[in-house]
Amino acid sequence: MLITKASEYAILSLIVLSKTNVPMDSETLSHELSISKSFLAKLLQTLAKSGILKSFKGVNGGFCLAKDPKEINMLDVMLSVEGKAPAVFECAPSIDNCPSNKANICSIWPFLNKLQGKIDSFLSDLTLADLLEE
C-alpha cells in the first residue's frame, strides 16, 4: 500500500505544524487531528530523528518543523515513518531481487518498475509547501 496511516498522519501533522510558529506537543496535536496520542508521539519522534522536525523538552516543549516546507518532500517523510520506500506493488525494484525469482520471464515487471520510478519521482518532487498551497 502506498500511503499507510503512518504516512497519512505524519503528513497531516506536518501540515498543522507548518501553520504555527511555536512548538506543539503531541497531546495537543493528537486532539486536533483526532489521532491516538501514543501512535502520533512515535511518528513525531521518528520525524525528529530524521531531521524533518525539531523536538523541544520541557513545559513549553513540543515539535516544530526543522526545515522550510519547500525543503520537506513527501518521499523523505514516507521513508522516515515507514522505514522503507513506499511501494504500489510487491514487485522488486531490480530483477535480481524478485521474490518469486521469475522477473526474467515476467512480462509486466518492466511496466511496474517504470510506474514505481514515476511515483518515487513525483513524491520526491512534491513538497510540504505544495500541499499547503492546495
Image: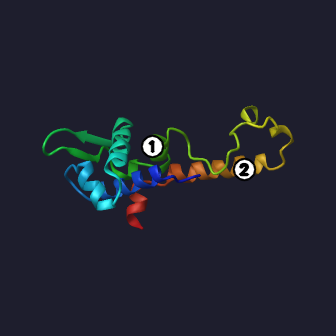
Residue 21, image x, y percentages: 21, 54
- In the rendered view of the protein, which quadrant contains the C terminus? bottom left
**Badge 2: how crowded within 10 Å, few (<14), some, or many (20+)?**
some
Q: Residue pushed farthest bottom?
A: 134
Residue 101 sits in quarter: top right
- The residue depicted at 38 percent of the width and 62 percent of the height is 132
Q: Residue pushed farthest right?
A: 105
- The residue depicted at 44 percent of the width and 54 percent of the height is 127
* Left or right: residue 1 compared with residue 13: right
* Left or right: residue 3 compared with residue 53: right
Q: Of callouts 1 and 2, which one flags the residue occurring earlier in the amino acid sequence?
A: 1
Q: Quick one: 33 or 133, which is closer to the camera? A: 33
Numbered disc in front, either 1 or 2: 1
Mark 1 to mark 2: distance in Å? 24 Å
Residue 6, image x, y percentages: 45, 49
Q: Residue pushed farthest left?
A: 59
- The residue depicted at 33 percent of the width and 60 percent of the height is 33
Amino acid type, callout 1: Val
Q: Is residue 18 in view from this perspective?
A: no
**Residue on which the image places disc 2:** 112
Q: Quick one: 16 or 128, which is closer to the camera? A: 16
**Residue on which the image places disc 1:** 81
**Badge 1: how crowded within 10 Å, few (<14), some, or many (20+)?**
many
Q: What is the number of the mark on residue 16?
A: none
Q: Is residue 40 in view from this perspective?
A: yes
- The residue depicted at 58 percent of the width and 48 percent of the height is 120
* Left or right: residue 51 compared with residue 4: left
Amino acid type, callout 2: Leu
Residue 51 sits in quarter: top left
Residue 8, image x, y percentages: 45, 55
